[in-house]
Image (cartoon, rainbow, N blue to C red):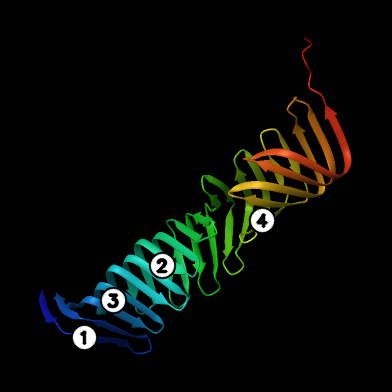
Amino acid sequence: MNRFVCPLIVLVLATAPDCYAAKIWARKMEIVRAGTDFATVLRDSVVLTDEQLQLVCRLAVFEESRDMARAKDSVTITTPDGILYADSAMYNLRTRVAELLGRVTVVQESLVISAAKLLYSVTDRQARADEGLVLENAGRGYRLTGKRGYYQLDSRTGIVDSEPVLSWVYCSDTVQATGRLITWRQTSALAVAAGRVRVVSGRGELTCDTALFYADADSGVAWGSPEVLDSRGRASGDTMVFNVHQGSLATVVVRGRADGVYTTDAGDIVDVGGTAFRLWFEQGDITQIDVDRMTTGRLLRAQRTQQ
């Protein structure tokens, strides 16, 4: 193995016709030869600039034969769409795709994305993770997690399509929504859940086919066979509008062909129908039900023991 060491500030220009043009700057450079291949080792304040992308680290190895730069030790990638942090990264100068590893974090204004491993495409302006992804809206208490997903930094839209979980977190209380797929739209602070949607708050649960969650308003809309239930009753209708307060499901309004069954404290069963229901929750239990324009009603009294 042969080496050529330059202890001075250097500027390396990596070019290939019609492919890429990147500038690399560092305080120290080392050219290493292993067999027939050469690698350039850059140390101390390494800066790689590729058009609007800037990669900063403490150590980088540029493999000319592979058009690959391996960055280590406090990697920071700055782009017009956000800033990416990682322990290490592999950046392909030809495809302009970076593979980031170890405590990966992407920051875009109030949105923080984290993963153990993440692929970032400069051309597509997309961050993708296949081994766990977290999208967290700082200051709002909302978090979207999943096994696999991606975030489009230019349109500010993310999709988690494997084991997605949307959480409202407040102290020790949490409302969680799951589904087949959940989309997050950062600009409008809107999440869309589709396919076997389930919203859980304590012992309370709301199920439907599709639901919208408005982060700024702490509210949502559910449709597609929506049903809400707790340990003592259930209600269903055409659509439901729900509110979340301090990490718990607070109210649910059922509209259109609303009907419900509920068991009272005395054990009686109330079966009613109407144009709309309003349900109040406390720690996941239904505490009050108001029926608007009741169309049907039935009370089934429980058998009581004579004393």
Task: Give residue 248's position: percent from left, percent from top.
Answer: 61, 46
Tag 1: amino acid: Val
Quadrant in which residue 128 is drawn: bottom left
User: Which of pointers 4 and 2 indicates the residue nearer the eye?
Assistant: 4
Q: Which mark is residue 66?
A: 3
Residue position for label 2:
119
Residue position for label 4:
219
Separation of disc 4 and disc 3 at Cα?
A: 51 Å
Separation of disc 4 and disc 2 at Cα?
A: 33 Å
Label 2 sits on a secondary structure element that is strand
Residue position for label 1:
10
Task: Give residue 111's position: percent from left, percent from top.
Answer: 50, 65
User: Which of pointers 4 and 1 indicates the residue nearer the eye?
Assistant: 4
Task: Give residue 197's position: percent from left, percent from top.
Answer: 63, 50
Q: Residue furthest top?
A: 307
Lower sequence index among marks 4 and 3: 3
Viewer-side residue, 253 vs 196: 253
- CB under 8 Å between callouts 2 and 1? no
User: Which of pointers 2 and 1 indicates the residue nearer the eye?
Assistant: 1
Separation of disc 2 and disc 1 at Cα?
A: 29 Å
Instruction: Give neighbour class at mark 3: few <14, some 14-19, many 20+ (Cα, 10 Å).
Output: few
Label 3 sits on a secondary structure element that is helix
Tag 3: amino acid: Arg
Separation of disc 4 and disc 1 at Cα?
A: 56 Å
In the rendered image, the quadrant that contains the C terminus is top right
Separation of disc 3 and disc 2 at Cα?
A: 18 Å
Lower sequence index among marks 2 and 1: 1
Task: Give residue 103's position: percent from left, percent from top.
Answer: 36, 60
Lower sequence index among marks 3 and 1: 1
User: Which of pointers 4 and 3 indicates the residue nearer the eye?
Assistant: 4
